[in-house]
Image (tube, rainbow, N blue to C red):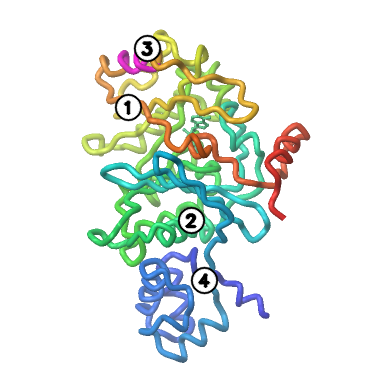
Amino acid sequence: MSASREINLMGLERNALRALLADMGEKPFRGDQLMQWIHQHGVLDFEKMTNLGKTLRSQLSESCTVKSLELIKESISVDGTRKWLFRLDDGNAIETVFIPEEDRGTLCVSSQAGCALNCTFCSTAQQGFNRNLTSAEIIGQLWAASQLLHSGVVPGSNRVITNVVLMGMGEPLLNFDNVVSAMQIMLDDFAYGLSKRRVTLSTSGVIPALDKLFDVCPVSLAVSLHAPNDELRNILVPVNKKYPIRELIAACKRYIGDDAGRRRVTIEYVMLDGVNDSDGQAKELLKCLQGLPAKINLIPFNPFPGSQYRRSPQNRIDAFREILMQAGIMTVTRRPRGDDIDAACGQLAGRITDRTRRTSRMELQENVGTVK
Ligand code: SAH
């Protein structure tokens, strides 16, 4: 069939849908209706979109598709966390996690197949990097999860997914345009209608992209700091060599701007036994964060096959937290969720074909197996 048939409407923002329909000689508001069918009613078959005229429906069927992701595997944790492995068209597979809590349901979404950043404590890094996900593949995770959980999208309906965090596989700011498009669909009232507060992007700190994000889509921000000085952070989060701590914190301050009364940056800090968890390091961390409206999430390290670190003992995490709290910074220790199904922070590996890395990485990947 013709190449135009390959337009996948799943990943198109509303403006793009409106423009597409205007090109077809339709009124732009038909684009709004199309978006509602896809994202609010979960309908992918044009023939079932009954408020669109017959001619338009067949025109759409001829030139477009709406494609979701193919589910390969679902794992359910004893704590209710669910992890899904989705197959992409090119054979790579990515992971998405749903974390139910009493007052909310959070979907953790991947932005890349693998990751290029090489953080030494993260399982995704071990897998290497294959490619950026398309906007359709990113929003497709929310679409598919909504279906799998029978989650409505309209507030007040049977909404199960109330929050989305870009904390799955990949560095979202290195896939900027596609991530922003997907987030615009999350926020759109004709799609998922999530507020900016309920969508959180987590980054290891790609500063130029962070500044750009503020301009185009200022969602909630989480920053993976993990170390209180450049010497250590250069090892744990190597992108620090390019974007060091002081500049990163300055960028965070710009991101919050004069909205400090309402907004805070979440600082993520993985607790690694004997590496970054001493009292002295807690105090150093406080110095780094001076003047930044922040809250801190301490993440007990989650091990994975071949990992070289250990989780800090609970009393160490408590003592570290106490120092931060005493200084007046809201600090929460993240409860590991879904670690029995390898769904916790840093355990997502998917099944990707590494296009960048050396053999040791390939061996690890063979153990996991690849999707044919
Ligand atoms: N690339 C983005 C988002 C993905 S990681 C980022 O760096 O923020 C989501 C969070 O999990 C990050 O804070 C990451 O540093 C943390 N993480 C990675 N591996 C982990 C592990 N093994 N245990 C605990 N947290 C981990």
Q: Do callouts 1 and 3 mark residues in contact (Cβ within 8 Å)?
A: no
Q: Cβ(mark 4) to ligand 1 < 8 Å?
A: no
Q: Amino acid at mark 2?
A: Gln
Q: Given this view, does label 1 or label 3 mark the residue nearer the observer?
A: 1
Q: Earlier in the sequence, mark 2 or mark 1?
A: 2
Indicate the secondary structure of the residue bearing disc 1. strand
Indicate the secondary structure of the residue bearing disc 2. helix
Residue 207 appears in the rendering: no
Predominant secondary structure, magenta span = helix
Residue 332, numbered circle:
1
**For the residues marked 3 and 4, what is the alpha-carbon distance in whole angstroms?**
52 Å
The answer to which of 217 and 343 lies nearer the viewer is 343
For mark 2, does the 10 Å Cα neighbourhood hold few (<14), some (14 to 19), or many (20 or more) residues?
many
Q: Earlier in the sequence, mark 1 or mark 4?
A: 4
Name the residue located 35 percent from the left edge and 42 percent from the top edge.
Answer: 220
Q: Earlier in the sequence, mark 3 or mark 2?
A: 2
Q: Amino acid at mark 3?
A: Lys
Residue at the far bottom: name it: 55
Question: Which residue matches tag 4?
Answer: 66
Q: Quadrant of the C terminus?
A: bottom right
Q: Is residue 318 magenta?
A: yes
Q: Earlier in the sequence, mark 2 or mark 4?
A: 4
Q: x and y percent of residue 266 in the render?
A: 36, 33
Residue 141, numbered circle:
2
